[in-house]
Image: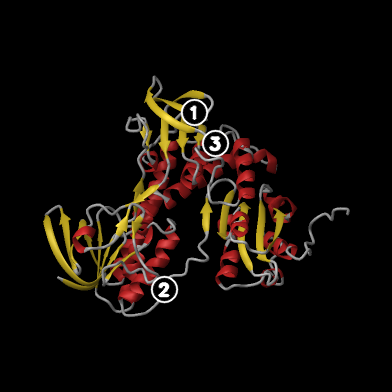
Amino acid sequence: MSYDVAVIGGGPGGYVAAIRAAQLGAKVLLIEKDQLGGVCLNRGCIPTKTLLKSAEKWRDLQHCNEFGLTADNIGFDFKLVTKRMNQVVEQMQKGIGQLIKSNGIDYKVGRASLAARNQINVNTNSGTEQYSARKIILATGSVPMGLPVPGGELPAVINSDQLLAMNQVPGNMVVIGAGAVGIEFAAIFQSFGCNITVIEMLPNILPNIDNEIVKRMALLLRKQGINMLTNTRVTGIKPGNRGAIVEISNGTTTQQIETEKVLASIGRIPVVSGLGLDEVGIEYTSKGIKVNAKMETTVEGVYAIGDVTGEFMWAHAASAAGMIAAENACGQNVTVDYKAVPGCIYTTPEVAMVGLTEQEALAQGKEFKVSKFNFAANSKAVSMGETDGMVKIIADRITDEVLGMHILGAHASDLIMEGVLAIQNKLPVKAIAHTIHPHPSLSETIMECAHGINGAIVHQVKRKA
């Protein structure tokens, strides 16, 4: 059967690309080897945020006396927590299925590979099927990276997919890797009573995030009871009575940690194996498939989007790239713009960022100004009991154009959109500062911080000269 556009991979990049191509009048085939929604829906964004909400409610119950409330005999059933998580995932899967059907997209479950520039083989339970498509979009995503240390293959060593499949909370867990995935899981499972130790080989947790935000976040995580060891390497893992013994070294001393589970969260790698890239002549490296600003690969008529390209491994970036690829596959001429891609880390409190960090601005030789505003000075944050955190804005010293925004605090993932819009549209900070914000609201933290670029913060005690 022949199609205008075929999409391989039904994650947040792939299914969005399929829908956009169908909206533009194309006859579309969507192929997915597993489940609609990809890693994001099934083993990433959605299940983890559902667990996080349960963890937050459990934490609120434990601290309800701070709000004048009392509760007796409180507890949680983690099997019911994971049951709700799976129900949310199933609901979202059905929703995507309805979107695919309502847009007239043909959907096929199977493992696809390129047989030629416009030919696809799909291995299904009933055999191999062949399809042709004028344009092909590759959206095969990524998988967790294996742990390259002796003992990394032991049963007690698990990845994020396996952790989400557990229906009980381990008594203790070592998390190897302090990036977004590792820190999120550490925060979630610590909330449910798991004794967590995070091991990071770099000097700080959350690499590539503004140093000031990282330092504050690290303090809060330690305050929550998470043990974090930076500048520390895992040298080996061996079986232990409780599960595993993790051997670590900081360069001067060695240590052994006995634990039930070891979560390997050292990164993700693009899924390029078995796609037929070499046979067709598509250029790629271990970091992903090479694409241009139109999401075109090195072979005409074949596009690649999302994690498989190694560019910005965020679901929202994959969806945006999917829209670009679909529009170009349907005859348009559009390019992707990555200058304002937000990043979000769903800890308690959340971290969100967009644009340049202060360190990046310095490295690029930018002339800039910095403003900061604490959540503790915001009336809504105080009333919510969510006073930990800050907003930080970096702006051009001459033009006042917003170069970066970084938020540590409640609902940071929602608040960051003011920074995204400002950077995307090259707005000066006054565009934020002189826009009336609702009161009381957390968004006022951003308004106050924007005023602070030029020394006009109202709700901040004036320091004596």
Viewer-proximal residue among 364 and 188? 364
Q: Left or right: where does residue 54 sit relative to residue 465?
A: left
Q: Left or right: where does residue 100 sit relative to residue 266?
A: left
Q: Which residue is mark 2?
A: 335
Question: Residue drawn at (69%, 40%), measured in percent from left and top?
Answer: 66
Residue type at tag 1: Ser
Instruction: Indicate the quadrant containing the C terminus: top left, top right, bottom left or bottom right.
Output: bottom right
On the image, the x and y values in percent for residue 354 come to: 56, 60
Q: Which residue is mark 3?
A: 230
- SS of the residue at dot 2? loop
Q: CA distance from mark 1 to mark 2?
A: 46 Å
Q: Left or right: where does residue 160 sit relative to residue 359?
A: left
Residue type at tag 2: Thr
- SS of the residue at dot 3? loop
Q: Which residue is mark 1?
A: 249
Residue type at tag 3: Thr
Q: Quadrant of residue 91?
A: bottom left
Question: Residue drawn at (36%, 59%), measured in percent from left and top?
Answer: 309
Labels 1 and 3 touching (C-beta < 8 A): no
Q: Nearer the viewer, mark 1 or mark 3?
A: 1
